[in-house]
Image (cartoon, rainbow, N blue to C red):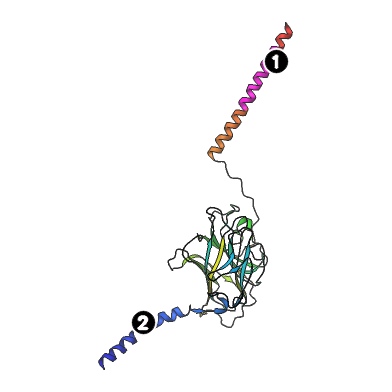
Amino acid sequence: MIYAKSISCITSIVTLFIAPILAEWNTQDYIRREHSLTKPYQASGMAMPYWDFLGSTIVTSNYVRLTPDLQSKSGAIWNTHPCHTRNWDLQVQFKVHGRGKDLFGDGFVIWYVKDRMQTGPVFGSKDYFNGLAIVMDTYSNHNGAHNHQHPYISAMINNGTLHYDHDRDGTHTQLAGCEAKFRNYNHDTYISIVYRDDTLIVSTDLEGKNAWKECFKVENVLLPTGYFFGASATTGDLSDNHDIIAIKMYELDLLESQNKNEDRSHIIPSAATFEAPRERIEDSKPAMSGVKTFLWMMFIAIVIIVLVVLGIMWYQKRQENSRKRLY
């Protein structure tokens, strides 16, 4: 009897301390199956529940490959159900890999946009989109006024009026970004995109530590409900395998400060840092290195010496002709 009471007392104490922790975890553990992609991908034939695909996309038992490691390929997958959740956490397990060591491309994008199943020049999807693009850019064309390395992760909010300038890596319209070396890992790589209370937080787990590392955080971001999740990728002269292994969308609880009855379906996508594209300024020509400068100066000196020698020879020849005429 005393033993049973002791067990009951211990259980009550453990429950008292553990319950709040579990309650906190469970607020972020409500996965929305209709917005998620997990193995096995195929239900029957080539159909995937809740997802459509187009372009060069192929579905295997282990991954959904948006593009193979071949030139000029483009593929995408799109969720068939619009997202009506206010606060969400989209976690994507992916793998970008290929034969290229120093040159590779182009990258892929994770989308939350109004129009699905659209092809175009922005990593395989349409330009002038409405919504959010998380750009996973692997190809640096060394253009534009930026000093970051690649691969690079950035965010862009578009209300349908902005052009993604691929020649400038989108730096003129991005909200924020960070360098993230996510190619050719043997372990799993992940990205988390959290949108909660008008705040966008992008984090990564690229080192296999099962821990999120914040990439960037942007406040005062307005996104409507009713848009679609998707992912697209493209290759050009350079290429990579762009694989999506899993997509898990978690519905997050509303905060007390959020109006539960607010209709956000007609919100125009925008952000506090939302700016019109800056005027394109062509890159200045890089200064010559010391070796190039030395060689160039040596070439000029040789040309001058040759001209002087030719001038002297011409002058001497003229003098000889003059003396011959005198005799």
Is 22 situated left or right of 247 in this image?
left
Residue 78 lies in what quarter of the image? bottom right
Q: Which residue is mark 1?
A: 318
Mark 1 residue element:
helix
How far across and down, in percent of the image, does residue 311 sit?
66, 21
Work out whether mark 1 precedes mark 2 in sequence or the reverse, and give the earlier one.
2
State the predominant SS element of the stretch in magenta.
Answer: helix
Q: Is residue 159 above or below residue 302?
A: below
Q: On the rendered image, what quadrant is the N terminus found in? A: bottom left
Verify whether residue 23 appears in magenta: no
Kindly identify the amino acid type of the residue bearing the numbered disc 2: Phe
Name the residue furthest bottom.
1
Verify whether residue 311 appears in magenta: yes
Q: Nearer the viewer, residue 206 or 11?
A: 206
Are there few (<14), some (14-19), or many (20+) residues within 10 Å of tag 2?
A: few
Kindly identify the amino acid type of the residue bearing the numbered disc 1: Arg
Q: Which mark is residue 8?
A: none
Per the rendered image, the range of residues in magenta is 304-320
